[in-house]
Amino acid sequence: MVTVGDIACEPGVPTTPVQCQDLATADLATSLRPDAVVALGDLQYESGNLEDFSARWSRTWGRFDDIVLPVPGNHEYGTDAAAGYVSYFDTGPYYAHDLGAWRVYLLDSNCDRIDCEQEAAWLTDDLTAHPSTCTAIAMHHPRWSSSTVHGSQEQVDVLWKAAVDGGVDLSLAGHDHDYERFAPLDTDGGLTDTEPAASHFVVGTGGRSFYQVGNPETGSAFAAEDVFGVLELTLDSTSFGWRFVDIQGDVLDQGDRACT
């Protein structure tokens, strides 16, 4: 599986070394031959209208539309009720998808636009109804982030807590245009050697632009700024492995962890 967010510029905005590298990240993802692509929101700037999705996203990352599992970002809500995103992907506001032995929850973290308490209740119920050794959540806004631009997003705490309490192993987010990996965190964002805890990744490196990383939050284990790339995940039945690969093909971070 390949995952990344914060991807496609508006049509007509020029590609430079520091912006609009969505074609380069799409080419990188193609070289990794993924079975699934989790797209972490802010997929089409600036307002996620359908015309721009058709003009830019479709010509770069649109090659993965048959295997993409998207979530909406705040820029998708630049159109009323995220109408462009909804028309293009037709996934519903939040949903679950099985990938091999894994169950992956694709969440809407725009808690100013939807009822996240209701969404968290749905997540809790589905985790109970579909017990799995390995589970993941993906949403746009990161509960934890060391970026100097957005940083940790308290408004999604209800989703984070429902996920970790429900035994989720892996958390994926974007929003901040950098890469950051956290050690397993508990419901309050603390380091723990006991269950429950989730490994958390921020992967906002899909091509739009760069953000800087500031003072590390608790548990920040690795961070990279001024880089475009994707996170490649190998989902095994009882564990997962990761590699963060930049558009030059260099592996900047890698490792593995058993599910709990």
Image (cartoon, grey):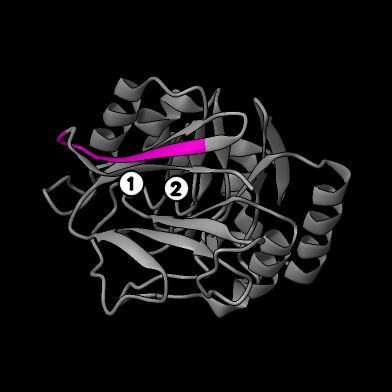
Mark 1 neighbour class, 10 Å CA radius: few under 14, some 14 to 19, many 20 or more: many
Residue 244: x and y in percent read 31, 42
Foreground: 236 or 103? 236
Q: Quadrant of residue 209?
A: bottom left
Main secondary structure found in the magenta portion: strand
Residue 132: x and y in percent read 75, 39
- Which residue is painted at 26% across and 66% down in the image? 211
Q: Are marks 2 and 1 in contact (CB under 8 Å)?
A: yes
- In the image, residue 180 sits, relative to residue 52, either above or below, namely below
- Which residue is painted at 70% across and 72% down in the image? 158
- The disc at residue 59 is none
Q: Mark 2 vs mark 1: which is more N-terminal?
A: 2
- The disc at residue 43 is 2
Seen in the image, is 130 located left or right of residue 229? right
Residue wearing tag 1: 206
Residue 243 colored in magenta in the image: yes
Q: Amino acid at mark 2?
A: Leu
- Which residue is painted at 68% across and 38% down in the image? 90
Residue 76 seen from this side: no
- Which residue is painted at 77% across and 61% down in the image? 119
> Callout 1: helix, strand or loop?
loop
- In the image, residue 155 sits, relative to residue 2, either above or below, namely below
Residue 226: x and y in percent read 17, 58
Q: Amino acid at mark 1?
A: Gly
- The part of the chain drawn in magenta is 240-248
Mark 2 neighbour class, 10 Å CA radius: few under 14, some 14 to 19, many 20 or more: many
Residue 62 colored in magenta in the image: no
Front position among marks 2 and 1: 1
Residue 108: x and y in percent read 64, 57
Q: Report the residue that reaches farthest toward the front.
A: 193
